[in-house]
Image (cartoon, rainbow, N blue to C red):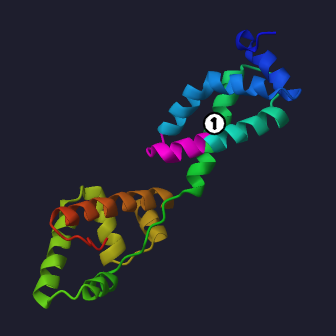
Amino acid sequence: MNLLVSSDEELISLFQSGNNEAFAILLHRYADQIKHSIRQIISSIEEAEDVFQDLSIHFSIKLKTAYKENGKFGGWLHCVVDNYLCSYCRKMKPKITDLDLETVKDWQNEYELSSQDREHKYAELRKSVKELPEELRILVEMKIWKRMTLEAIAVKLNSNKSTIAKRLQSAYHQLEKSMLAKGYDDAFI
């Protein structure tokens, strides 16, 4: 039997009976689609390859233990891949570091800047905050200067806490880039 021309259902049946070559062919058929889904959320080529390998193992386990032929295989596989990637993203949830003015000032002291340099750097940070898009600027001001928690910000803005965390991460990243562009190699964000 030529496995390359076998249908998905035939390959699944063979794999569930112990033929690993059938799984390799099935995986090869859908590898581009799976990798495309991974690349939608992971930009690092190395990390994407690692996720593909882990997802391949997950896929083989699901195929052996949970697949029931009651629809299109491609749709089932799409759900398995999406669910795996959702779980992966939850595990890799960005962590937001709470910042406050005292922390920023402590970091400045670590670098032993003169009083004038510290004030200049702090002024540049405030300018960078003002240059942020309004939505991000408001979040940073609430978090850093008003010392509000993520939960308090979410309640005040009638938003989800994880959404606020992601937006703050984006704002911090933009502030870091701005400060680096201004010549502050430590950027202190």
The spot of residue 185 in percent (x, y) is: 23, 70
Please give left or right for residue 90 compared with residue 186 in the image.
right
The residue lying at 60 percent from left, 28 percent from top is 31
Q: Quadrant of the C terminus?
A: bottom left
Q: What is the three-letter code of the residue carrying label 1? A: Val
> In terms of secondary structure, where does tag 1 sit?
helix
Task: State the residue in front, 156 or 142.
Answer: 142
The spot of residue 111 in percent (x, y) is: 25, 84
Q: Quadrant of the N terminus?
A: top right
Residue located beneath label 1 in the image = 81
Q: Is residue 78 above or below residue 125?
A: above
Verify whether residue 153 appears in magenta. Answer: no
The residue lying at 68 percent from left, 29 percent from top is 77
Q: Is residue 37 above or below residue 84?
A: above
Task: Name the outermost residue toward the right.
Answer: 17
The spot of residue 120 in percent (x, y) is: 12, 79
Please give left or right for residue 184 compared with residue 81 in the image.
left
Task: For residue 30, say whether it is visible.
Answer: yes
Verify whether residue 46 appears in magenta. Answer: yes
Magenta highlight: main SS: helix
